[in-house]
Image: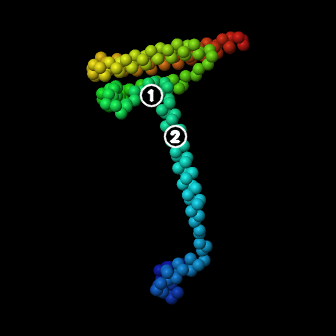
Amino acid sequence: MAQDLRDLFKNNESFKPHKMPENHEKRFMEMLDEQLPKKKRNSTYLFLKIAASLLLLLSLGTIFYDSSDTVASQVVDVPEKSDNTNDKITLGDISPDLKKIENYYIANINVELAEVEITEENQQLFDGYMNRLEELNSEYQKLTEELNEVGPNEQTVSALIDNLQLRLQLLYRLKDKLEELKQAKNEKFNDQQV
């Protein structure tokens, strides 16, 4: 019963290869075009989709641009360059490494400030730390002025970096104090319940 398929194809006439008629592909495509419905493209919907996408991108860009600008200006004074020829030299202008250090500390300061939860109980403590932070910020501005007057030197650059470190450490201490207050309040609450 078992037959070799190769022998079966060789011996059977209906399986012999035959040549396709000329233009068979073109005729097939014409028949296919007649049978399939033609799609009409509505250009107004395409236009509306593109307009909606652009509007969405512009609004998101505006929101993110506005929010990033206000955070930096509210929390830490970031020196901005003006178009005047009297541009002030900042820590970041001295070298790319110092710019990275400055950006690192400013970003961390902003993050730490954003994470602080202010309540009525800790408002006074928070205000005290913010006053100290403002003092350090004004000192940073004075050091930047000194950098412009005297020129870059090791002491001024060191003092600027130390100032940024102090501000960040101050915020870490504030967070620790706020956590201690929170724990003390929870313990007091638990003691009153028992």
Q: Of label 2 and label 1, which has the lower sequence position?
A: 2
Residue 119 position (above or below residue 28) = above
Q: Where is residue 5 in the image (x, y as percent from the top left)?
A: 50, 79
- Please rate how many residues cluster around mark 2, counting C-alpha atoms within 10 Å: few if below 14, some from 14 to 19, many from 20: few
Closer to the camera, 181 or 82? 82
Q: Is residue 165 toward the left or the right of residue 112 in the image?
A: left
Looking at the rendered structure, the kind of residue marked 2 is Thr
Looking at the rendered structure, the kind of residue marked 1 is Ala
Q: Which residue is drawn at 59% across and 64% down?
A: 42
Q: How many labels does the image show?
A: 2
Q: What element carries label 1?
A: helix
Q: Residue furthest bottom?
A: 13
Closer to the camera, 149 or 188? 149
Q: Residue furthest front?
A: 84
The residue wearing badge 2 is 62
Q: State whether residue 97 appears in this view.
A: no
Q: In which quarter of the image is residue 49?
A: bottom right
The residue wearing badge 1 is 107
